[in-house]
Amino acid sequence: MDRYLKSEEASKFLGISSSSLWELKSKKVLKSGKHWIYVKGKPRNNILFNVDKIRQWQIDMTRYIESPISDINELSEIKTLED
């Protein structure tokens, strides 16, 4: 079951500042309905953040950033239709 928390609680749980959390939301890195919701289902209402989905995003981004360069080299070796 997913956990939804207010921004202050979510930022502590996720280990990021509240302002960073809001920046990720405003830049649409965090997706509405997936990473955050309107509490009453209407704009300009309070927002809750899905800390489980955001934690998974943190994990996925870490794996992407830390993927070995060899993975990138393998991609460049894939033959194209022209070959």
Image (spheres, helix red, strand yellow):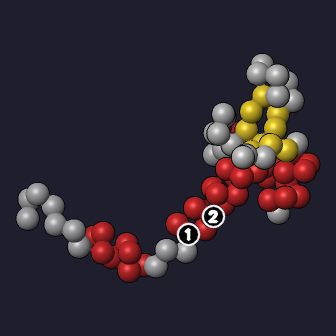
| Few, some or many residues within 10 Å of mark 1 (<14, 14–19, 20+) | few
Instruction: Indicate the secondary structure of the residue bearing disc 1.
Output: helix
**On the image, which quarter does residue 28 sit in?**
top right
Side (left or right) of 17 relative to 64: right
Q: Which mark is residue 63?
A: 1
Compare residues 53 and 79 and report the one nearer the observer: 53
Instruction: Give the residue at x 64% y 57%.
Output: 56
Q: Callout 2: helix, strand or loop?
A: helix
- Measured as percent of width and height from the top left, residue 65 is found at 55, 69
Q: Is residue 1 visible?
A: yes
Q: Position of residue 26 (x, y in %)?
A: 72, 39
Residue 50 in the image: above or below residue 16: above
Q: Quadrant of the image for the C terminus?
A: bottom left
- Where is residue 72 shown, x and y percent of the image? 37, 72
Residue drawn at x 90%, y 50% is 9
Q: Amino acid at mark 1?
A: Arg
Q: Which residue is mark 2?
A: 59
Query: Does the rendering let one see residue 22?
Result: no
Q: Give above or below for 56 relative to 64.
A: above
Would you call the spot at circle 2 few (<14 residues within 10 Å), some (14-19), or many (20 or more)?
Answer: few
Q: Residue at x 70, y 57 (%)?
A: 55
For this orientation, the residue located farthest to the right is: 8
Left or right relative to 61: residue 24: right
Residue 48, numbered label: none
